[in-house]
Image (tube, grey):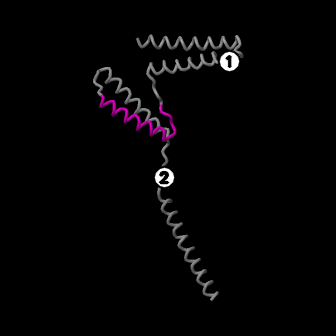
Amino acid sequence: MTFKIRFFAITMLLVFAQTATLQANDLFLRHSNSIRVFQDNTVLIKKIKAKINALSKRRDKLKKLKKWSNSQEKKYNLQLSKLNKSLNKFGEESEITLNVEQIVSKLQKQLKYLNNARVNSVAKNKFTQKDDSIYKLKAGKLIDSILRLRRSVE
């Protein structure tokens, strides 16, 4: 009885070994005849960014000519979101262009945080003249840039 079990185990081992080598050879032969070309992602990223720029230029041009409609805006936003998603797949962050109002609101938030840091009760006791001069310099730059942007809109 042990002879039959040993004989069966040995024959099964040989059968499995043969099929495994045949499958491995088939896989090797299939891949050895084909050539794999890996495309560089930088080329695709440049193409996608160029497409985004072309879409935005076309949109600006048609808006100046007053031939831009709401349906075109929806299509534009859809195409832009698809292109941005594909950029994110490649690990590239899409560039966000901000309106003047959005830039002004961001600068105002920065100024608000800067003021809160100065007026904070903990900072009042530790604020030195050097810190105060740095604050005045930063706040002055922020206020000047906000005023410049608001004038450019008008």
Instruction: Find the distance from the CA under tag 2 to the CA under tag 1.
Output: 62 Å
User: Does dot 2 land on a helix, a strand or a loop?
Assistant: loop
The region drawn magenta spans: 70-94
Q: Which mark is residue 36?
A: 2
Residue beneath the point at 33% across and 30% down: 73
Q: Is residue 85 above or below residue 113?
A: below
Outermost residue, bottom side? 1
Instruction: Decide which of 45, 128 is in the foreground and name it.
Output: 128
Q: Is residue 129 above or below residue 66?
A: above
User: Does dot 1 land on a helix, a strand or a loop?
Assistant: helix
* Residue type beneath disc 2: Arg
Q: Is residue 135 above or below residue 10?
A: above
Q: Which mark is residue 55?
A: none
Residue beneath the point at 45% across and 25% down: 97
Percent across and percent down for residue 19 are 53, 72
Residue under label 1? 123
